[in-house]
Amino acid sequence: MKIARLADLADPAACPLLVVKVGSSLLVDRQGVRRNWLEGLVAEIAEARTRGQAVIVVSSGAIALGAAKLGLAKGGRGSLADAQAAAAVGQIALSGLWADLLGAHGLTAAQLLLTLEDLEDRRRYLNATATLTRLLDAGAVPVINENDSVATQEIRFGDNDRLAARVAQAARASAVLLLSDVDGLFDRNPVEPGAKLLPEVRGVTAEVHAMASGGSSSGMGSGGMTSKLQAAEIAERAGIALAIASGLHDAPIARATAKGIGTLFLARRKDGGRKAWLGGRLRLKGALVVDAGAAKALSQGSSLLAAGITAVEGDFHRGDAVAVRGLDGATVAHGLAEYDARDCALLIGRKSADHAAILGYAPRSAVVHRDQLVLL
Ligand code: GLU
């Protein structure tokens, strides 16, 4: 059953597994943890479980909470070292809080702290999938955050929106609910008069991106609408619905699902497990720039041949994930390269018949085979 309306997020038949992401500004304010609000949310999670839905929580708030405890400026986001220290202090309190509140409903919390690489590397991604599956089978509620204390600037998600979408993929969830401090996506900056909340988005197009102004409105988290749209893109390609709704109210899940206040990004297609992982990859080792003819051939299901490549970027090896970009700079696909970057460069623009002589070994049938390629 496909998710077509916000109400379906509360329907165990349409949504047997829901990922709920809670933003920092909902969990923590200047006084510390917003415990009453969180108790209400946990009661809703317990209700979802009673209805027969499994739930994974992606909880932000470690940095904000730790910064408050340590008295760090700028909510702990003044420097990477501050954020790492704040997260270490905040995370221990945060997980204790979730464990206590879920425990009060007879639910067992399970903490997972993930880094970007845990979900980018195929083997580690499968490990995370196995752990999540086992925890859910055992009836636990996984509570996930980025491992901010060890993640460095270059190798971190930096926002829990995309983390939630990647976790949903790994756990094969049906939907993600991003609870934030906004009602959803508006057709223009929501402070402008006449701004309208979009109830439904079919495909995150350039026009949709233009509606997001960027930056976090609360200054607590690091998300903002831009990272929410990136999360929606990951989800829609993986066959997962994603909703943005406000958590600034009591019973926020019911407000989104029963009253229908929020924005639902419909799933677009269902790539198989490996392709969905590849399409959602955030860090790629390099890029292959292709001409218009090759871009068209790819869109019709062909493999990428050297003849259509105009440039090779980055230092990747055979088997690494690379972006395929058109001449206009837009990424058209992600794929696994059949050659090292050096050999790809030798083959630029060259016909298949010449490859054996250029390389000095039996060539592969394509630079990226269509089975290892996912269109974006
Ligand atoms: N992982 C961060 C934290 O726990 C939050 C990232 C975000 O704001 O999305 O504080």
Image: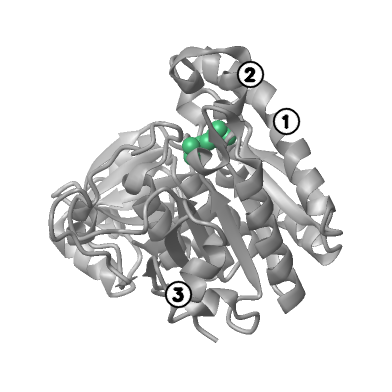
Q: Position of residue 162 (x, y in %)?
A: 47, 48
Q: Is residue 102 left or right of residue 239?
A: right
Which one is in front in this view, the residue at disc 1 or the one at disc 3?
Answer: 3
Q: Label 2 crowding class (10 Å Cα cut-off): few <14, some 14-19, many 20+?
A: few
Query: Which of the 4 quarters of the picture holds residue 260?
Result: bottom left
* The C terminus lies in quadrant: bottom left
Alpha carbon distance from label 3 to label 2: 37 Å
Callout 3 touching callout 2 (CB < 8 Å): no
Q: Which of the marked residues, 2 or 1, is nearer the chain's N terminus?
A: 2
Q: Which three-letter amino acid code belongs to the residue tagged 2?
A: Lys
Who is closer to the viewer here, 268 or 314?
268
Q: Which of the marked residues, 1 or 3, is nearer the chain's N terminus?
A: 1
Q: Label 3 crowding class (10 Å Cα cut-off): few <14, some 14-19, many 20+?
A: few
Q: Is residue 33 left or right of residue 158?
A: right
| Residue 262 visible in the current orientation | yes
Image label count: 3
Q: Which three-letter amino acid code belongs to the residue tagged 3?
A: Lys
Task: Report the residue marked by disc 3.
Answer: 259
Task: Report the residue marked by disc 2.
Answer: 69
Say what secondary structure mark 1 lies in: helix
Q: Which three-letter amino acid code belongs to the residue tagged 1?
A: Ala
Callout 1 touching callout 3 (CB < 8 Å): no
Say what secondary structure mark 2 lies in: helix
